[in-house]
Structure formats: C-alpha cells, structure tokens
Image (tube, rainbow, N blue to C red):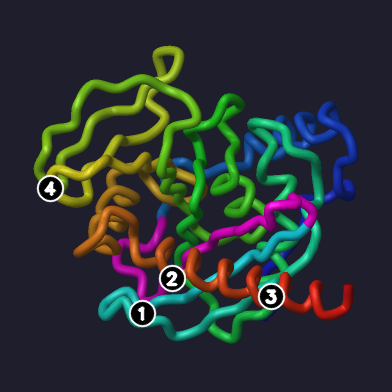
Amino acid sequence: MAISGDGGGGWPRTVAEAMAVQERLRPLVDLVGPGPRRPATVAGLDVAYAESGDLLAAAVTVLDAATLAVVDRAVHVGEPAFGYVPGLFAFRELPALLAALDGLSVRPELLVCDGHGLAHPRRFGLACHLGVVTGLPAIGVGKTPLVGEWTGPARERGASAPLVDRGETVGRVLRTQDGVKPVFVSVGHRMGLDDAVERVLALAPRYRLPETTRTADRLCREALAAAAVGRERWA
C-alpha cells in the first residue's frame, strides 16, 4: 500500500537545506480539515533508537478505532537519515516511518504521531511533515512539550488548557487520566484541534498515552531488540 513521499527535491543533507524544506512545505499544512470525525482505523507511529545512535526501528500499528484492537502492523529497521538537531527530528525518522507505512496492508484514516505537529518552533513538526507528504490526516501527541507555555489543566480526565507559543495557540495540554501528567496535542494536517483532542481521549481510555502510541512503542522496541541481537551474531 504505497502512501509515501519525500515532499520533492530529494533528502536534505544540511541544517539549512532541512529548514528550507520545512519552510517550503509548511504552507501546505491544512489546520482545519475536514478530517475524519469518526475514523474506522487509526495508526500509531513511533521510533526507537539503539544506544549507539546509528540504528533505529520505526513502527506503525493500525488500530480499529472502536475496539482499539491492532488490525495491522509494520516495521522498518535502518539508520537515521539525518543528524541529531532539535526541531529537525522529522528528517531523522521520516524515511523509516514512510517505509513502515508502505508495509501496511490496511490504509489508516488518521495518523497519530509520537511527537508534535504545529507545536514546533517553525510550526512544522513530524505530524505536519507526515501529513503533508502522505496526504493523510495527522495529529501529534507529545509526552513533553517542545515549545509553549500553559496554565493548568485541572486534574480530571478530559481537562485541557491552551498551549501558547509567542502569543499563538499551537496545541492543547490534555489530561487523559485523573491526576496523571498531561500530554501535548497539536494538529498535524487535515484535522482541527478540537477534533484532535477528542480523538486522543477516545484512544486513551485507561492510560496516559493513547493506545496508538503504546502499541507502536512496544513494536519498535521489540524490533530494535531483535535487530541488536542479529548484529551481535554477525559481529
């Protein structure tokens, strides 16, 4: 199921080239929609790195949105495609994530990234980049903030507060479970912020993180561990 793309122009090799790609693609982001109000399938995307930093595993799990059961999965193991530069993480991970997406047999209706979308210094995080190059609706759910300030939210599940950066609301600080640390939700592509928050709550009925992130995290870690064992055998 081919849904990948690189945005054109080849893969950047320098920081300046990567930032230029972000500037070129950023106007293509749709921050309103229409995204799927009730998607049937939702994909989680996550990446795990070896301690050496020269190996990664990118995983995609597709969940039935009603039951949260995993209906498809794919993994790609390879090397980071770019250096470690804050604000440019998408360029390290995107080729591997696109390869994993191409390994799916079920086309997801929504991508949920372990990272950020609009809540990014240049308003073009991983969720935006993935959404633009695949054309799929996408949102970002970060464990920690990359930018912004906030007050609150209240302690009960579903409480939220605006995430504001330089006077602009770039996301929502969302409490997914009573009394636990919030997550940081931002729009990636073809999805409004209110709908994104609603989707994240539906995907997190019992735990802080949405099931999309939890299942993709397990899968990429398992794949990375298997790849590390294979390396040792051939060393």
Range drawn in magenta: 35-54
Query: Going from the N terminus, do you reach mark 4 or mark 3 first?
Result: 3
Quadrant assignment for the C terminus: bottom right
- Compared across the picture, whether 149 is left or right of 100 comes to left
Give the residue number, with chain letter if any, for mark 1: 64
Identify the secondary structure beneath mark 2: helix
Query: Going from the N terminus, do you reach mark 2 or mark 4 first?
Result: 4
C-alpha span from label 1 to label 2: 12 Å
Task: Look at discs 4 and 1 and give the one toward the viewer.
Answer: 4
Give the residue number, with chain letter if any, for mark 3: 102
Q: Amino acid at mark 3?
A: Asp
Query: Going from the N terminus, do you reach mark 3 or mark 1 first?
Result: 1
Query: Is the residue under label 2 in contact with that under label 1 (CB below 8 Å)?
Result: no
Identify the secondary structure beneath mark 4: loop
x then y, percent, for residue 65:
32, 74
Give the residue number, with chain letter if any, for mark 2: 215
C-alpha span from label 3 to label 1: 19 Å
Give the residue number, with chain letter if any, for mark 4: 178
Q: Amino acid at mark 1?
A: Asp
